[in-house]
Image (cartoon, rainbow, N blue to C red):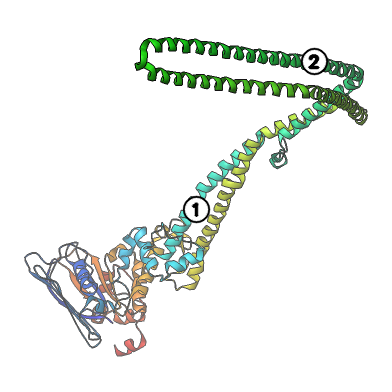
Amino acid sequence: MKISLLKIKDYIGIEELNWNPGNTNVIVGPKSSGKTTITEALEKTISNNQRRTEVIRHGADESLLFVAMDNGLEVDRRLRVDKSDYLKLAGDMVEKSTEGELRKFLAGDIFRPLDFLDLDIDKQTEIILSMIKMDYSPEQINGWFGEDVLSKINTSKHLLQILKDIESQRYKERTEVNREVRTLEAQVKGIEQELPANYDGEEWKSKKVQEYYDKVSKAQELSKRIGLAQSVINEIDQRIQIITAEAENDRSRTKEKYSNEKQDIKDLIQLKQEEIKKKDEEKTVITEKAVKEKADVDVWLNEEIQKLKEEAAEKKVVIDEQVNENFKEIAEEITNIKYQISAKIESLTGLAEKKELELQSISKETKQNIRRENEKVGLADKLLEENKDVDMEAKINKLQETADKVADMREHLHEWNRMVDIRDGKLAKKRNYSNQLTNLIEVARNKPSELLKQHKLPLEGISVDEDSMIRIKGTLLDGLSDGEALEISFKLALQRMGDLRVMCLDGFERLNDSEQEKIIRLCEDNEIQTFITRVEEMEGFEIIDETKQAEKCKECFHKFVEGEGHCHLYEKMLVGCKKFKPMTKPQKESN
């Protein structure tokens, strides 16, 4: 599909242009003469891409852009100042007038391959990668790695760039982790150097210092017991004499104790009997006092005559009651004293028996003490016999040395545990994590080449480096030669074309003769309609259809057809391109 008619009105600097372009169209003119405006108008009409902010010619209210295709498709676009822009599509293959409908005829934008050369490397990379269709879901990508690797990755990029970003991110992370690993390894090595040679904390962890010092204490206690056993044997007779003497003293003290206790009881009985005698005397005194008081009452009664008889009788009753009360209290006290005397007499009766029992107990205890002493002598003999060949001092020294060593080794356990915690904890985790990162990096590094083998590539030898930049056979895009870059730009342009086989070539004069010739041949071989702009000092600009122009050049046309000669009009149009591909045989015969 090619353009058969182009109409432009009030677009940028063009007031009006009606043009039926040919297959190869050259627009020649000085700078700022409107050459590029034509190609921009064509691009705006078809793809709606706009390179300038203001495109409606100054003073006009509307720009008209109209393109008719050789297959009947018509595109009518109006750009308006105060109203919305207008788009109308016509043709048998058109269902509705929308930008989406128009985009069906384009695989990419109307491509300007020479513009591609002027783009920065990032934009060139973006264009090339957009041509490698790799549509994978986040779940599929994470599945390659076995974990979520996209959480901090810009997933709006191309998959190859995403993989390089994952690799770069994990590589930086692994570099930091490995730095931490080296730091931890240095810590472990430093601690190992401070520990005794071949130190194994597991050997000393289960050993308890107190148990070893307890063995020393037990050995020292045994040594002490051996000494005491010898003393027991040597002093047995003296101990028995002491026990016998102590028993005799106990007997004397017991006899004296019970003798004193017996006398105390007798003295107490006598004292209680004297108390009874005093109570009897007290009764006599009370009786005598009562008789006297009664006599006094009688005297008083006689003196008081009859009026006091009743009162006297009452007082006598009171006195009798008081006497009876006193007698009763005294009787109770006497009974209590007699009970106490009876108890003491009874205790005095059992005192001799108690004395005999206590003396028997002393004798029994004396025999037991002597027997225990003899048993001690037997145990002492056995202890001495069991240890007669043992050098207790050497044994104690050896146990002390062992205990001191255990204590010393145990003092290093804290550092050893710290080393093990680092080695088997943080360091092991960091090493494992570093290995995991290495595995992720390997996947991210190998996956692009694997994917590139599975997908159609716009160019051979494409790879993506660690900075997510495109390389062609190992060379960055901005490191390619001019010829290599030009060839790549045209290969990309060809692949980005859809049904509309149109290419715009601005600034054609920047290319040398061979490059111009190569482009012309590529366009002819691929049946591309080209719109070429070339700067030349002249009045205004001139549009040249090279095919029609060649037909007018009768002097050199046959040589031009045979591909051996040159055309002076071509020289003017293509800046000295001397050799061209011959026209096909049907074209030659028809001409």
Residue 526's place in the image compared with 340, above or below, is below
Query: What x and y, as percent, mark residue 199?
Result: 71, 38
Q: Which residue is mark 1?
A: 171
Q: Along the line of sight, which residue is nearer the eye, 258 or 184?
A: 258
Query: What x and y, as percent, mark residue 322?
Result: 49, 20
Left or right for 359, reference 68: right
Q: In the image, what residue occupies the spot 75% across and 31% down? A: 214
Residue type at numbered disc 1:
Tyr
Residue type at numbered disc 2:
Arg
Of badges 2 and 1, the one in the foreground is 2
Quarter-wise, where is residue 374 in the image?
top right
Q: Mark 1: few, some, or many residues within 10 Å (few <14, many ≥20)?
A: some
Query: What x and y, as percent, mark residue 424?
Result: 61, 47
Q: Which residue is mark 2?
A: 253
Q: Earlier in the sequence, mark 2 or mark 1?
A: 1
Residue 210's place in the image compared with 325, above or below, is below
Say if residue 199 shows up in the picture.
Answer: yes
Quarter-wise, where is residue 114 in the image?
bottom left
